Image (cartoon, rainbow, N blue to C red):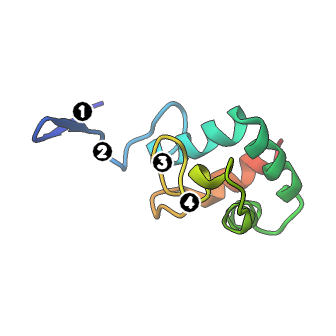
Amino acid sequence: MEFKQYGKELIMPKEEEYQGWSNYETWNVALWIGGDEGLYSIAKECKESAHPYQEFVNILKSVNTEEMASITYQTPDGVAWSDSGINKDEVNEYIREL
């Protein structure tokens, strides 16, 4: 994988496959859904929905507790749950398999 350098930061191209997922954003979202107990529980509640990932995002936006405030709009790594680069079909399938 080739990285591009902007100033002092190395930026990974968005269009390349990453860790078996279609891109970094999709991988990062799936990583947090599968690796955080609270997010995993929310995602499992959404698995029967026609659009499980969108339902998951909607629930996160509606959660208004201090402990969840830091992940309401983005993963702890800074990827927005609504990032346009996320392959929603891939994440929908992942959530349905939980």
Q: State yes or no: discs 2 and 3 in contact (Cβ < 8 Å).
A: no
- Amino acid type of the residue that numbered disc 1 sits on in the rendered structure: Glu
Work out which residue is located at the far front of the displayed protein and give it. Answer: 66
Q: CA distance from mark 3 to mark 4?
A: 14 Å
Work out which residue is located at the far left of the displayed protein and give it. Answer: 7
Q: Relative to 2, is 16 above or below?
A: below
Foreground of the two, 76 or 97: 76
Q: Earlier in the sequence, mark 2 or mark 1?
A: 1
Identified at 53% across, 54% down, the residue is 74
Q: Which residue is mark 4?
A: 73
* Numbered mark located on residue 25 in the image: 3
Q: State yes or no: discs 2 and 1 in contact (Cβ < 8 Å).
A: yes
Q: Which residue is mark 1?
A: 2
- Amino acid type of the residue that numbered disc 2 sits on in the rendered structure: Pro
Identified at 57% across, 50% down, the residue is 70
Residue 17 pos. (x, y %): 44, 39
Q: Which of pointers 3 and 1 indicates the residue nearer the eye?
A: 3
Residue 94 pos. (x, y %): 73, 46
Mark 3 crowd level (few <14, some 14–19, many ≥20, 10 Å Cα): many
Q: Which residue is mark 2?
A: 13
- SS type, badge 1: loop
Q: CA distance from mark 2 to mark 1?
A: 8 Å
Q: Relative to 97, is 63 above or below?
A: below
Q: Earlier in the sequence, mark 1 or mark 4?
A: 1
The quarter in which the N terminus is drawn is top left
